[in-house]
Amino acid sequence: MLHVAKPNSSIRTKPLDPLAYSHKTHSAMIEFTRACNLKCTYCAVSQPYWEPTELDLNKISVDNIIKSLKSRGTKTAILHGHGETTIVDNWHIHADKFIDNGINAAICTNLAKNFTEEEIEILSKFISITVSIDTTDPVLFKKMRRGGDLRQVALNMTKIKSKAMQKKHKINWIWSSVIADVNIHGVVDLIDYGLSLGVNTFCLCNLTVLPTPPGGLKIKHLSELPKEEAIKALELLNTAKLRCEQHGALFDAKAGLIDTLERKVNAD
């Protein structure tokens, strides 16, 4: 994967070692922004040191990026980085250019905004959409993902899926969820709800512990659970995995999640 453009990053001017050089790039990540419309309590974007910069498209045009990627035979453009791409002005017009030029578009998004019909139309052309969603409890959702509403996420998914079905286009739907002490008890409900919406892959992520932002919900790593609760948490994760297997969905638990609980449960 080639990370094509990142705000505030320098451009390499020294040639790569010939042994490290490739004439082909299978997929490329383009980070349009480091800003976000949500202030999730566990995210670096909510920290006071975060700088919400954007890619300067006057210096690095989308047309030039596409031209470069096409020359390298790139198959997929992943249109996100750490920020929320869909808050960038004309983001969907930029995205459509990639698709029109034969490059598949993929994105990770919180689906938290009220999209226009034009934006829904463009999203329905994407080959893969990863949705950041940590719980299906509406109250907890608002506390964890400040500024977001679970109902808006579900509505956007339904609209995009409907539009894609009309054109007989299949989207790979992925849910990415940060699992911690506050939402582990609802992890099976999360899987069940996602399956009902046609999610193909569930990516359960390990919490990176950061200072709790002002007014934010305090969230703890699963390793801080008492042993009795850790045992229950491990059972829930195993049940969630089984649910996915039963429905043909991929269950992807990142390092530090299940193994951390297993070490705690098996400790003397």
Image (tube, grey):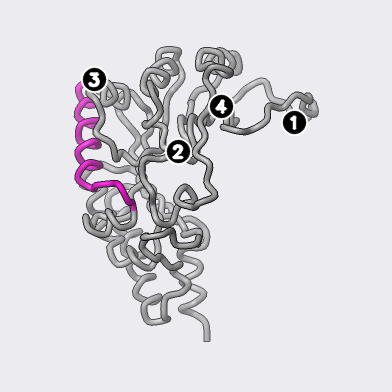
Dot in front, 4 or 2: 2
Q: Give amino acid for label 2.
A: Ala
Count of marks placed on residues? 4
Q: Answer with mark 3 or mark 1, whichever residue precedes in sequence.
A: 1
> How far separated are the C-alphas under marks 1 and 2?
33 Å
The residue singled out by tag 3 in the image is: 167
* Image disc number at residue 213: none
The residue singled out by tag 2 in the image is: 35
The residue singled out by tag 4 in the image is: 26
Q: Answer with mark 3 or mark 2, whichever residue precedes in sequence.
A: 2
Q: Give amino acid for label 4.
A: His
Question: Up-down: is 181 above or below 32?
Answer: below
Relative image position of residue 150 (x, y in whole percent)? 23, 48
Q: Determine if the magenta segment contains residue 161.
A: yes
Start-end of magenta stretch = 145-166
Marks 3 & 1, CB-CB < 8 Å contact: no
Label 1 CA crowd tier, 10 Å (few <14, some 14–19, many 20+): few
> How far separated are the C-alphas under marks 4 and 2?
27 Å
Whether residue 201 is visible, yes or no, is: no
> How far separated are the C-alphas under marks 4 and 1?
15 Å
